[in-house]
Amino acid sequence: MKHLFSILSVLGLIGLSQIAAKVSASEIAVTIKPLHSLVTAVAGNTAKPYLLVSGNSSPHGFKFKPSQLVALSKAKIIFVIDEDFETFMEKALNSLSKNVKNVGVAKSGRVKLLPLRKGGAWEEEKHDGHDHGHDHGSNDMHVWLDPKNAVRMVKGIVRALSKVFPENKDVYRSNARKFVASISELDQELENHFAKNKNRPFIVFHDAYQYFEKRYGLEGVGSITFDPHDFPSSKRLRDVRAKLKSTKAACVFKEPQFSDRLVKTVVQGTSAKIVSLDPLGSAIKPGAEMYLSLLQQMRNSFTKCFQQ
């Protein structure tokens, strides 16, 4: 209940009673839902940014619908995490007018990137030969799962929107200040929560949670797959099962966008629980408050994992 007031304050951004120039539909486009939340919060009542990857879709293996390509063609500015993350955007961006501003928020927000972890059990030095299907370059781009990164990205979003729509820059700055305050409040709440709720080792379906783990001192010990669309090698599955048993991991996380068949295979014959964890918040309604709800959902999933 405590954080309900923060969410309501974010919702209040949408009704901000400042004079602002309206931006027409689809002039602002965003790839994934957590980033769409940040952009929507900054835009406030000036625009309704267009979301590309919605529902149970995933940026891993995403395919455009014709209607989405039409919407993109009307955009003046497009927000992505990074060109190495939303690789599905490459052809679409190349086909658009050179006047369209393409903003990679990891770079514009000056986020400090973490290197990709290697292998199924993360002490390994080399990738299994079957685990290279998903190209993120050499860095982990799931940057939004550290709220401090989200704050940096919000500042980058303000700078980018202000260049394209300078008439709204004061509104963007005002909205950003309030949204950053809400993020920071929830971040502190989560830090306190995880300090009191001592964690146990866990294994994830694919390695998307490194930023969240490091922010709150959580003990991830391995991932079943590198690319959620690729079947892991038998060696990787053996390594992960061995790690699960040796660390007595509390749970193995599944993701709602993908089959849990591999997760069930890994936990078979062990006492580890299966818990759902979703880095994209697929079931959360899009909007300015979505990012805060995602962080709360992440907290709840980890808490369920750690419960005896």
Image: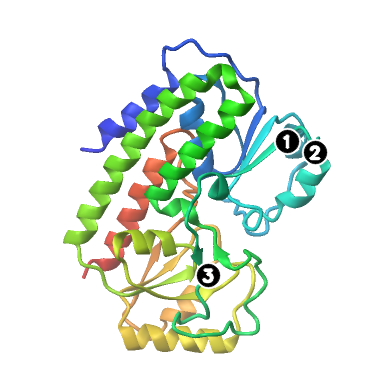
Would you place residue 275 above or below residue 106 in this image?
below
Where does residue 167 sit, x and y in percent of width and height? Answer: 57, 16
Residue identified by numbered label 1: 72
Amino acid type for the residue under numbered disc 2: Leu
Mark 2 neighbour density, 10 Å: few (under 14) some (14–19) many (20 or more):
some
On-image quarter of the N terminus: top left
Circle nearer the viewer, 2 or 1 = 2
* 75 is higher (above) or lower (below) than 86: above
Q: Quadrant of residue 292?
A: top left
* Residue named by callout 2: 96
- The location of residue 99, given as percent across then percent down, is 77, 32
What is the CA distance from the residue labelled 1 to the residue labelled 3?
A: 30 Å
Q: Which residue sits at x=63%, y=65%?
A: 137
> Which quadrant of the rendered structure holds the C terminus?
bottom left
Under circle 2, the secondary element is loop
Q: Is residue 285 visible?
A: no
Question: Which residue lies under the disc numbered 3?
Answer: 116
